[in-house]
Image (cartoon, rainbow, N blue to C red):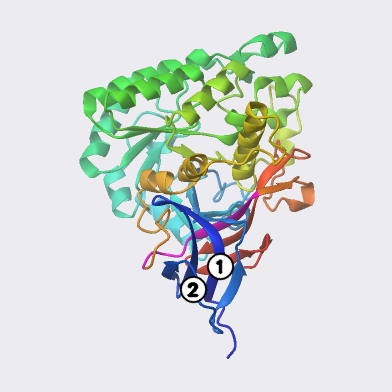
Amino acid sequence: MVADYRKYLIRGGTLVDSIGVRRADLLIEDGKIIASEPGIESQRQYQEIDARGLVVSSGFVDLHAHLREPGNEKSETIRSGSQAGILGGYTALVAMPNTTPTIDSPEVVQYVQRLADGAPLDIFFAGAITKGRMGESLTEMSKMADLGIKLFTDDGTGVQNAQVMRRALEFSKGIGVTIAQHCEDLELANAGSINEGAVSSILGVKGIPNAAEDVMVARDIELVRLTGARLHFLHISTARSAAMVKMSKSDGLPITAEVTPHHLVLSDTQLMGFDPVFKVNPPLRSNHDRLGLWDAFDGGVFDAVATDHAPHHKESKDTTLDHAAFGLIGLQTSFAAVLGELHRRLDKQNPEDIDGGGLSDEQLMHLVSLFTWKPARIARIEKMHGCQLVAGQPANITIFDPKARWRLVGTDVVSRSKNSPYFDTDLVGKVLYTFVNGELKLKEGELCL
């Protein structure tokens, strides 16, 4: 009997999902897990994957990706971004609405959903809060929600007017969707390029103060307190903002927050060489803030690690800091960047651990949760992604080697843009297999589309 390549037996892996960490085999058929238990017998009709020494997790979910299509296909397309996602272990992406045209009407929603038909992973779109992301008039959120939009954001600028934000929160509560906020007071940001601090002073470059983020986080927490609506904070970058999110959760407010790998791994000292690849928004902060974000990470403040994958064509980055575009790519490297930094932190805590700092089951489960079931719940896709690895659930699965060390080189990058900060950087954790709805899209680290 010839093997049916929609039937797989994943043998000997360490399973990690919301149930916990355990050793078991998985049997996959017709897009679903049909068995999850130790010692499943080999069957000729199933292709076997030897997962001994590997971690088998729910498929990764990214809440924050810029796929640039429609309007800027020179920098990225839905297909190229999807391929990057698969290499990074993602089975679902939430695409931001700052495209051309903006995703701010039912007609544009239907248009981009057609564009995403046939993508090699699942694409979900966020809708804009205001028309044209101008911060003035609310979009037809109800009609867009009827088409499946569950997350609304003006990402890139954020809603500046408090009254508009209040109305958006009140309306979102009534229709059962979530507002996601890019927290930046544009007047305080004052068209800065990098973090305001010692580095910006040395370089003579206009900076963006922490207060530009902190002020808006504080404002919007109070608006949630007023309205009772759900709010998701995008790319938190300051220790103070993380502390406010922690306090708001202790008050029982329906608030979630994400952090990016680059704000966990990098600091504004990377900009001492004037390299625009490190220019992002919100900016890379001081090492003090970076360490504060790790405290929040360890303390369970964050609900997701999101890439904020922001591809830019070479022309947009190959210029001065003042004129370069904000953003970097991250879909291929996000998990490895965070896991690598976790290993480095563990190595410092236990320098005699020559194995590279193995994670405990609790640490591994916490890390995986921020890439899988927690962001899936925020995106309202938990019935398809971030599911438990048990019989009857969709086979959206990521398999990675938690100890593999590797380096990103230019030829590895499948994104149309190459603005990655991780070239020639030691990365830890290599995604080897990605299953999307039961179909094997990545095999032994190679795309198979």
Residue found at the very far bottom of the displayed protein: 1
Q: What residue is rendered at 63% in x and 20% in y?
A: 194
Q: Quadrant of residue 216?
A: top left
Q: Earlier in the sequence, mark 1 or mark 2?
A: 1
Q: Residue furthest front?
A: 352
303 relative position to 52: left or right: left
Say if residue 173 shows up in the picture.
Answer: yes
Q: Residue furthest left?
A: 174
As drawn, 224 above or below 305? above
Counting from the top left corner in percent of width and height, residue 41 is at 51, 77
Q: For the residue marked with disc 2, what is the amino acid?
A: Ile
Residue nearest the observer in this picture, 37 or 273: 37
x and y percent of residue 209 in the render? Answer: 55, 13
The N terminus lies in which quarter of the figure? bottom right
- Mark seen at residue 40: 2
The range drawn in magenta is 392-402
Badge 1: how crowded within 10 Å, few (<14), some, or many (20+)? Answer: many
In the image, 232 versus 299, the foreground residue is 299
* Residue 163 makes an appearance in the image: no
Q: Indicate whether residue 39 is drawn in magenta.
A: no
Residue 398: say if magenta.
yes
- Disc tally is 2
Instruction: Evaluate if marks 1 and 2 touch, with contact meaning CB atoms under 8 Å apart.
Output: yes
Image x and y of residue 65, in percent = 53, 44
Q: What residue does disc 1 label?
A: 11
Circle on res. 140 = none
Q: Quadrant of the C terminus?
A: bottom right
**Inter-mark Cα distance, 1 to 2:** 8 Å
Residue 167 at x, y percent in the picture: 26, 29
